[in-house]
Image (cartoon, helix red, strand yellow):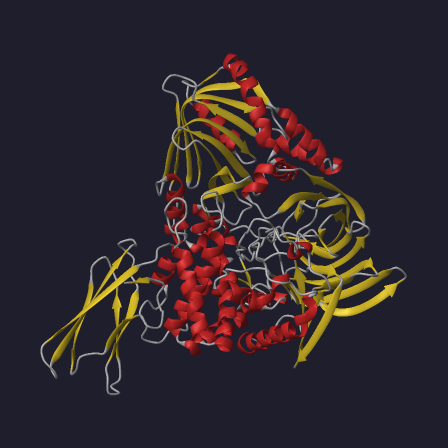
Amino acid sequence: MGALRLSCCFFAANLLYAGAAADLARQISEAGLDSAECYRVHDVTLTREDIRLYFTDGFFLFGKPVAGAPVSAVFVSSVQAGDGEMLLLPPTRSERESLSSFTGSPNLNEHFKAAVLLFTDDTYHDLMTQIGADPANRKSPEMGLTLAPDWTSVVRNITGSFETRLVLDLLSGRPVARPFLFAAIGGKQLGNFDIVYDLRSQQQITVGRTSHRDNRSFFDVWTCFESRSVRNRQRPGPSPEFEVDDFRIEATVVPPDLRLQVVTRVKVRPGGPARAVPFELSRRMRVTSARVDGRPAEIFERESVRSNLIHDRGNDLFLLVPAQPLEPGREYEFEFHHEGAVISDAGNKVYAVGSRGNWYPNRGLQFARFNVIFRYPRDLDLVSSGEVVSDTEEGEWKVTRRRAATPVRMVGFNLGFYERAKITRGRETVEVCANRNLERALEARPRQPVILTPQPPPVWAGRRREQQPLAFPAEAAPIPSSPAARSRELAGSVASALEFMSARFGPPPLHTLTVSPVPGAFGQGFPGLIYLSTLSYLSPHERPVTHLRGSQQLFFSELLYAHEVAHQWWGNVIATSGYQHDWLLEALANYSALLYVEKIKGSRALESVLNEYRADLLAKGESGRTVESSGPIALGLRLESSQTPTAWHTIVYEKGSWILHMLRRRMGDERFLSFLAELRRRYQWKSVDTESFRLLAAEFLPAKAADRKLESFFDQWVYSSGVPTLQMKYTLAGKAPALKLTVTLQQSGVADDFSVPVPVEIQFGRGAPPIIRVLRTSDQPAVFTIPVRQAPTKVLLDPGNSVLSVKK
């Protein structure tokens, strides 16, 4: 083993001088399987914390060495009674529920007939140690000659999907500081599925499968969680590979096709020794060259299909390989030259910017300062995140300079032919930009009627959402000649929402907020810049959409702009630490918008929206299951699977709003608003996770509240799924004034351990004050009996909508 380590270090040292990531990738792709390294094996085990792989009886065929040792292997049970077995026990309720929804079992115990392994850890050493220790295991090169032709192409295809990651790890030499193991399993009952053990990931263990539906590929994550050593604090969780600050971006919009050419400079501070640095960039952009402190650096990029699908953020991973290894803690200047087609034409000189948050290299959306310069044709208008530094003209070009002096996580831009309306209130200024023309989709009248369902995509969820095409009923309403007609009215509305939220959450990150239009049926919020669907620029009677129910019209009229304004705080001041916590930002933004709607339209408007949200959650899909039962909200983007491709939006936005509404009812209005203000204060320019959010919320419960740490509340509403059906009955016995009222509450439709406190309000006539009692549900009927002097006029179950439930 010592010789193996030495050869690996020698190989890595040579790479340092050659800087040949591409050469290393070529070696990986050409390695193939080594028929001479085939072994007949019995009872070999590979354990990676919570993952256990048992190779009971079969053959192992290893790949040819790369950087001193193989990085691939194949196991096949092609013998009589041959077998492999995989065991995994998810540690949390939500992960067990997720796994069960895909496999029918909360634990994974699957026998398999074949497995393909890729690894940069000690897998080869661990397997060979066991193979050599048992005399029953023997070398079988003749079987290798049989297996290699059948499996070489399979291994190369899978290796190609992880080539960038393999290069990243192997460039550092062995042992790899944060290695990974990938296993493609051919299960006997479940079919093919993947296992990933990745010490670079925030959640080290992932199990799932690639699926296809409606001409779209998904990676259905069955379960994903922190490994045992990280959960038990025996190993620290992964820290960022590097810190970034001081972005200086120079972007040119080149006519006639409006191609974007960009130079991005950024200060980078590595967290540890780095031979290669991973970055992400939109798939619509391509890096053409890079430098580190002025010296040319290698750019390595491959289309890693499977890896990108597993970690789908809408970006591609690429590596920057400097001429010399980077030292931890030292600050370096990185310079990227990149270009691509991120601007598309929606017709009538209306443009759409895709890849709005990932058009420059970044990784992890860290808070940083930004200075941005845009050069673009003089006849266009352009808006961007940040405070105005200057707007000038240079011949046929306009030059726009923007600066974000306070830390922000990303910057965006938009362009078109705009008319503008500006309103200043106090320190904050709102400027609304409206296209002078309507996009062509709003003018066309299709022959077949199609009803639009607005689904705003997230900014902060990490994965890119493409714009949704517009489609309208044939009986579309008349369209105004310009969407600019309501610009000043819209500016006033946005300023009102900004003023409302600033009074409750503190000042926004930037004092200027620009509103710009996008084709489609969604919005998006950047620091100081929000995108709104063109439909929000039109009055309700002018929108070419009929048959929309109340909350959908309200969505375009009030909710959309208020939601995106709220992202100035929830997403731009406060971030989250991972996709499983991103529901917080969308739920906070959406409920903040509902608070604003409640202020301007009254409590009935809020109740109406919540009632429609409940109906959406309880709607049944093709399988007969409700949308809400697709999984716990803590699964985040994983709710968007081949089984439930639209569940993510309904659960995160709508159940998330219900969760916050239920917390509000537990706290009371004053405490709830204080809680939101403290959330902003405590986590400004930081990341919050679900557990930190829970503990902070618990601080604002009334002194005598049950479930003081909100553990039961979060366990049921956040980490699990289920909406109870509540049925109340009451009886009166005796004669006035010595009556006895007995109330019985029965719960159904949820797990036996589901339990929530539900208020019951007993009302009397003649001005007598109501009596309020709280019943806690369980799998048994909840009962209380109280003496009353007169018969009640009403007995109301949960009159304040404090519980998401179905009442009977």
192 left or right, relative to 384: left
The N terminus, quarter of image: top right
Residue at left 64%, top 44%? 317
Residue 542 visible? The answer is yes
Q: Which residue sits furthest left? A: 734
Which residue reaches farthest right? 395
Task: Let me know if residue 330 appears in the view.
Answer: no
- Give the answer, above or below, for where 256 lies relative to 672: above
Q: Which quarter shows the C terminus?
A: bottom left
Along the viewing direction, whichever of 305 and 202 lies nearer the viewer? 305
> How far from the left and from the top, in percent, is residue 358?
66, 53
**In this view, which residue lies farthest toward the bottom?**
767
Q: Quadrant location of residue 739?
A: bottom left
Q: Residue at the spot x=23%, y=57% of the render?
A: 779
Q: Between residue 290 and residue 500, name the one nearer to us.
A: 500
Image position of 629 with respect to 84: above or below: below
